[in-house]
Image: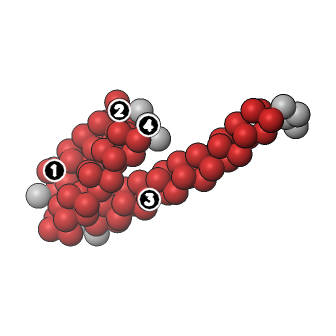
């Protein structure tokens, strides 16, 4: 465990950020899951709606630095491709 005042503060900051990042990642996973469930159900309309909700959430995670920008781009691209193939 850290002993210096600055190191203790750094531990507190890291924990706070870890929890915030975890919340964002969980939200991304949930929206991606909703798109995938609509795809499995072969519901093109619902899949397109879910994708429209998921894209800004994934982009926001990338802009916050929780996801790498290319990872976010890849996720969006793959989901969009699947939705497009369904419709």
Marks 1 and 3: CB-CB under 8 Å?
no
- Looking at the rendered structure, the secondary structure element under dot 3 is helix
In the picture of the structure, the residue carrying the numbered disc 3 is: 27
In the picture of the structure, the residue carrying the numbered disc 1 is: 85
Residue 38 in percent (x, y) is at 28, 66
| Disc 2 versus disc 1: nearer the observer | 2
Residue 39 visible at all: no
Identify the mark nearer the N-term, 4 or 1. Answer: 4
Tell which of 49 and 7 is nearer to you. Answer: 7
69 sits left or right of 18 in the view? left
Identify the mark nearer the N-term, 2 or 1. Answer: 2
Q: Please give the label number shown on residue 58.
A: none
In the picture of the structure, the residue carrying the numbered disc 4 is: 65
The Cα atoms of the two marked residues, 4 and 3, are separated by: 15 Å
Label 3 crowding class (10 Å Cα cut-off): few <14, some 14-19, many 20+? some
In the picture of the structure, the residue carrying the numbered disc 2 is: 69
């Amino acid at each position: 465990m850290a002993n210096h005042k600055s190191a203790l503060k750094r531990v507190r900051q890291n924990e706070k950020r870890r929890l915030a990042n975890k919340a964002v990642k969980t939200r991304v996973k949930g929206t991606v899951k909703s798109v995938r469930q609509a795809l499995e159900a072969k519901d093109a309309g619902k899949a397109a709606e879910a994708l429209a909700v998921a894209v800004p959430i994934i982009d926001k995670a990338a802009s916050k630095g929780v996801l790498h920008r290319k990872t976010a781009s890849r996720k969006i691209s793959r989901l969009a491709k699947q939705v497009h193939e369904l419709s």
